[in-house]
Image (cartoon, rainbow, N blue to C red):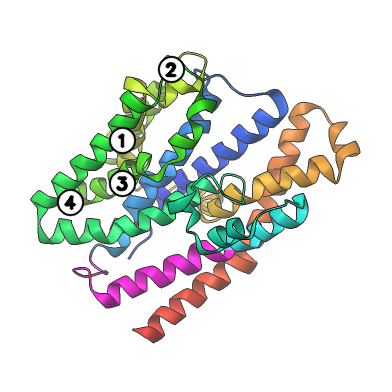
Amino acid sequence: MNRLSSLDYLRGLAAFGIMVFHYSMWTYGFAKGGDFIGKIGIYAVPFFYIISGLTLYHVYYTKIGGPSIKGLKDFAIKRIFRIFPLYWLLGFATMAIEKSDLSLSSVILNLTGLFGIIHWENNICYGGWSIGNELVFYLFFPVFIFLSKRSKISFYIFSLLLLLIYLWFAFIHIDSTKSIIDFWIDYMNPLNQVFLFLGGYLIGFLFSDVHISKFAGILLAITTFLVFIFYPVKDDSIHLISGINRVAFTLMCLTICFAFYKTDFGLPGLVHKLFATLGEISYSVYLVHPIMWYVLTHFLQHSFSNLPPLARVLTGITASLFLSLLIYRLFEKYFMRLGAQLSAKMA
């Protein structure tokens, strides 16, 4: 199955956006909900979820069968070897560096990935809650395949149910008169996020045979991105995750992913290489950058703290990208090949 270069670009940009958001927050303070960087801080992860659902549809819809036992084994093995090795590596690194006093149950839940089901906020890696969500989505994915292939009516009813749960969180459960801190654990709930993953799957399922011109796709993406930037939101980020604003930003994310998917444009030469590489190392960037900041601020505290704020941010970005590239090439790719080989042997 051919890679979708444009989705790789978007995945890389989302990871880069999260890193910039965190480094900006840890340097200058928390961004307001109406600021572009504040919007990216909330909605870069939904971009990940939508791209994940869309990519898995693109790769596995035919390959996984009805789903078949063989297809499910292939999917499970490759996902395990893609997600767990890096999460374990950086989880142990986090425990070693921060010397956190974690309970045995917390460690076991993180090693098995079950924290995503039982205690989604109990993640060792900073930002690891979204990885726990992703693992939960992988349990939904065969259900999406089964229903969409066996009974489209049942699939649409199930999709409507997940949408209603999503809207219940946005309009009823999350109170926009309070602070985002009061509802952050509820926001991390995988049931509050799974519709985004389904949204990516639906883009592939409904529009895989739809063709639009490159000009139309790029124009749609740029226009929607401009709306994303200038859409007015009140200061507290609670207004980004509640009410009609959440619906609006969700539609924007889905539209941008649709445009990138259907256009599937390739950038020229070195520019393509840079953005494609950023997409490839996006998982490492996402998990590495908080550890890199901790190392810089604690182990190089004197020299790092004397740098101007912007220089600290740029230093952190450069160091994180470099380390992420090394980890991807020397660690992630090894386990990805191992997973592919094991899947082939079992087949």
Q: Which quarter of the figure has residue 75?
A: bottom left
Please tell me whether residue 240 is drawn above or below residue 315 in the rendered image: above
Count neighbours of disc 1 (C-alpha within 10 A) and say few if under 14, some if 14 to 19, many if 20 or more: some
Closer to the eye: label 1 or 2: 1
Q: Which quarter of the figure has residue 252?
A: top left
Residue 206 at x, y percent in the picture: 18, 47
Q: Nearer the viewer, residue 155 or 304?
A: 155
Question: Dot 4 corresponds to which residue?
Answer: 209
Closer to the eye: label 1 or 3: 1
- Disc 1 marks which amino acid? Tyr
| Marks 2 and 4, how far apart at CA | 32 Å
Please tell me whether residue 40 is drawn above or below residue 243 in the rendered image: below
Question: Dot 2 corresponds to which residue?
Answer: 230
Please tell me whether residue 340 is drawn above or below residue 195 in the rendered image: below
For residue 331, which numbered disc appears in the image? none
Please state the extent of the stretch shown in magenta in the rendering.
62-85
Q: Nearer the viewer, residue 65 or 91?
A: 91
For residue 200, which numbered disc appears in the image? 3
- Disc 3 marks which amino acid? Gly
> Element type at marker 1?
helix
- Disc 4 marks which amino acid? Asp
Q: Which of the marked residues, 1 or 2, is nearer the chain's N terminus?
A: 1
Q: Name the residue rendered at 29%, 47% in the picture.
A: 198
Classify residue 60 as left or right of residue 153: right
Q: Nearer the viewer, residue 336 or 142?
A: 142
> Element type at marker 4?
loop
For residue 166, which numbered disc appears in the image? 1
| Marks 1 and 4, how far apart at CA | 28 Å
Count neighbours of disc 3 (C-alpha within 10 A) and say few if under 14, some if 14 to 19, many if 20 or more: many
- Disc 2 marks which amino acid? Phe
Q: Which of the marked residues, 1 or 4, is nearer the chain's N terminus?
A: 1
| Marks 3 and 2, how far apart at CA | 24 Å
